[in-house]
Image (cartoon, rainbow, N blue to C red):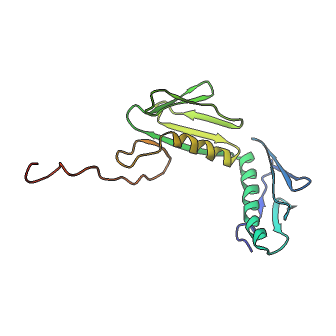
Amino acid sequence: MSRIGKLPVSLPKNVTVTVGQGNFVTVQGPKGQLRQQLPAEIKIEQVGEEMRVTRSSDAKNHRALHGLSRALLNNMVTGVDAGFMRILDIEGVGYRANMNGKHLVVMVGYSHPVEIVPPDGIAFEVDKAGRQITITGIDKQLVGQIAAQIRGLRPPEPYKGKGVRYRGEVVRRKAGKSGKVGSKDGK
């Protein structure tokens, strides 16, 4: 039995889940509404104040889909209730971000500023110094994808650590060239 799949998904009081034809799941809460089609081999039922996810057999593909379906359902419930947030830090001289209306403008060493238009359900926020970007939304997958796209503009480099990184990300630093430093014969 899947360790993740057998865990129930507890429903907050203000969240409703409806399972339609063909396992089309709709989750509605205070922050919005999410819809997703889960695999037909997986059975989703509400028992009291929680959702249970079960599989029809112990076939290899059913076991693989069991934990996945439960995790997707849990992410939908968490998203419409509390939402998701990803924080990016910007390191480097002259690197910064600011807001232009709802659009994010990032300056990370290119000859031009890069403007990012948020898709529906995503909001950007930048601190006063322009060194921290906060991405919020109800869809965990979309929040992570947008964060990865922004980080991909200028990933952190290992020599000086410049670039865009996730909050808490550790960048392994490398030593630079050491041929000229500390040679005894002065060459």
Residue 149 shown left or right of residue 169 in the figure: right
| Residue with the most extreme front position | 187
| Residue drawn at (35%, 44%) of the image | 160
Vertical side of 169 occupied by 102: above or below: above
Vertical side of 162 occupied by 64: above or below: below
| Residue drawn at (71%, 35%) of the image | 120
Quadrant of the frame with the N terminus: bottom right
Vertical side of 131 occupied by 84: above or below: below
The image quarter in which residue 39 lies: bottom right
| Residue with the most extreme right position | 21
Query: Closer to the camera, 42 or 17?
Result: 42
| Residue drawn at (60%, 35%) of the image | 124
| Residue drawn at (22%, 51%) of the image | 178
Residue 150 shown left or right of residue 32 in the figure: left
- Give the image location of residue 157, x and y in percent: 41, 46
All told, the count of numbered labels is 0
- Give the image location of residue 100, x and y in percent: 58, 24
| Residue with the most extreme top position | 101
Residue 149 shown left or right of residue 14 in the figure: left
- Give the image location of residue 31, x and y in percent: 75, 41
Residue 97 shown left or right of residue 18 in the figure: left
- Give the image location of residue 113, x and y in percent: 50, 27
